[in-house]
Image (cartoon, rainbow, N blue to C red):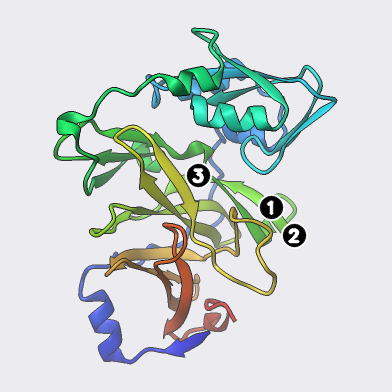
């Protein structure tokens, strides 16, 4: 649903806390994708390049090599988003992902110890400092938007490489063909603007550029739920549209995101078009940390404003 906001309401929402508008990039040259992203798009990437990509941000998480043990193994619901034939290999980061990969018909082994994922998962983790769970983190953006770092007052920091994050975009603009396609899996290119932290839960909402061409940005909001100091779960804020979502990884795209903010655990997202039209989307707490879409209001009624709010 769409609604019109009064000047007083707009002033209350922003009150100087949301970011200034970011001008959309025109005809920007796309940044090269990382091995994990290229692999998910079907490219024959050397698995050693993927392992090298993981080693720097996740030095303490075991990496597993996995071999398809059936006639075929369907791994299309999660990374690497492809099907495998018997004896084809892939890799998995951590025992949780390796266990899921085994559920798809693979046999997985730690590349260092040779252990199966269930054996690695049975190893008790090192106790956190003072036996406490992480509290509310502070966030910073590194490497020109390629990495997100979470810091706590007590405990180690966690630096997250966003290169493998992906979202299935419905009615997506295919920048290679310059046409609208029913859906397209897009990978995070960089963080745009500043992430925001929910002071009640510690969840971190991250504005992400997925693609850009012909003065159009396609963006999305990812929500990080820290799980301990060195791991996290990832969710996608789902912007509704004409069709139902095929899965929890899908969303209609946002335009150029100019600011995000948590307000009593509700997430406000401001986005707009190149013509200067802007709208605010509201996501209220829901079943997952990404919340549920609750409404949208136009705040700058310029050309193209009618398409900024989901119907």
Left or right, 76 with reference to 34? right
At a point 59% along the width and 36% down the height, the residue shown is 37
At a point 40% along the width and 19% down the height, the residue shown is 123
| Residues at marks 2 and 1 touching, judged by CB atoms closer than 8 Å | yes
Residue occupied by mark 3: 189
- The quarter of the picture where residue 262 lies is bottom left
Which circle, 1 or 3, is nearer the viewer?
1
Q: Badge 3: few (under 14), some or many (20 or more) residues near its Cα, within 10 Å?
A: many
Left or right, 48 with reference to 293? right
Say above or below: 300 vs 286.
Answer: below
Left or right, 113 with reference to 177? left
| Residue nearer the viewer, 124 or 108 | 124
- The quarter of the picture where residue 61 lies is top left
In space, the residues marked 2 and 1 are separated at their CA atoms by 7 Å
Judging from the image, what secondary structure is the residue with disc 3 in?
loop
Quadrant of the image for the C terminus? bottom right
| Residue nearer the viewer, 184 or 113 | 113
Q: Badge 2: few (under 14), some or many (20 or more) residues near its Cα, within 10 Å?
A: few
Residue occupied by mark 2: 181
Q: Earlier in the sequence, mark 2 or mark 3?
A: 2
Residue occupied by mark 1: 184
Left or right, 261 with reference to 253? left
Q: Is residue 277 among the parts visible in the rendering?
A: no
Residue 108, horizontal then vertical, whole percent: 62, 19
Say above or below: 62 vs 304.
Answer: above
Q: Is residue 25 among the parts visible in the rendering?
A: yes
Say above or below: 114 vs 302.
Answer: above
| Residue nearer the viewer, 116 or 148 | 116
In space, the residues marked 1 and 3 are separated at their CA atoms by 15 Å
In space, the residues marked 2 and 3 are separated at their CA atoms by 20 Å
């Amino acid at each position: 649903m769409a609604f019109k906001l009064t000047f007083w309401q707009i002033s209350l929402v922003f009150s100087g806390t949301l970011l200034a508008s970011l001008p959309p990039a025109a005809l920007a040259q796309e940044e090269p994708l990382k091995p994990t992203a290229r692999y998910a798009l079907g490219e024959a990437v050397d698995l050693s390049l993927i392992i090298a990509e993981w080693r720097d941000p996740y030095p303490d998480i075991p990496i597993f090599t996995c071999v398809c043990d059936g006639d075929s193994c369907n791994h299309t619901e999660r990374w690497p988003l492809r099907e495998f034939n018997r004896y084809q290999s892939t890799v998995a980061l951590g025992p949780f992902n390796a266990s899921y990969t085994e559920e798809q018909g693979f046999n997985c082994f730690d590349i260092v110890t040779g252990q199966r994922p269930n054996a690695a998962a049975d190893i008790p983790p090192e106790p956190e400092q003072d036996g406490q769970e992480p509290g509310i983190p502070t966030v910073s953006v590194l490497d020109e938007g390629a990495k997100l770092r979470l810091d706590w007052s007590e405990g180690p920091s966690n630096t997250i490489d966003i290169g493998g994050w992906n979202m299935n975009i419905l009615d997506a603009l295919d920048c290679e063909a310059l046409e609208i396609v029913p859906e397209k899996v897009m990978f995070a290119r960089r963080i745009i603007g500043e992430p925001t932290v929910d002071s009640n839960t510690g969840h971190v909402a991250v504005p992400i550029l997925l693609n850009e061409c012909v003065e159009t940005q396609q963006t999305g909001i990812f929500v990080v739920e820290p799980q301990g100091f060195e791991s996290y779960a990832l969710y996608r804020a789902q912007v509704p549209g004409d069709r139902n979502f095929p899965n929890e990884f899908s969303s209609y795209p946002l335009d150029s995101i100019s600011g995000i903010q948590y307000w009593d655990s509700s997430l406000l997202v401001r986005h707009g078009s190149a013509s200067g039209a802007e709208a605010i989307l509201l996501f209220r707490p829901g079943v997952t940390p990404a919340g549920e879409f609750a409404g949208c209001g136009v705040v700058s009624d310029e050309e193209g404003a009618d398409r900024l709010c989901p119907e």
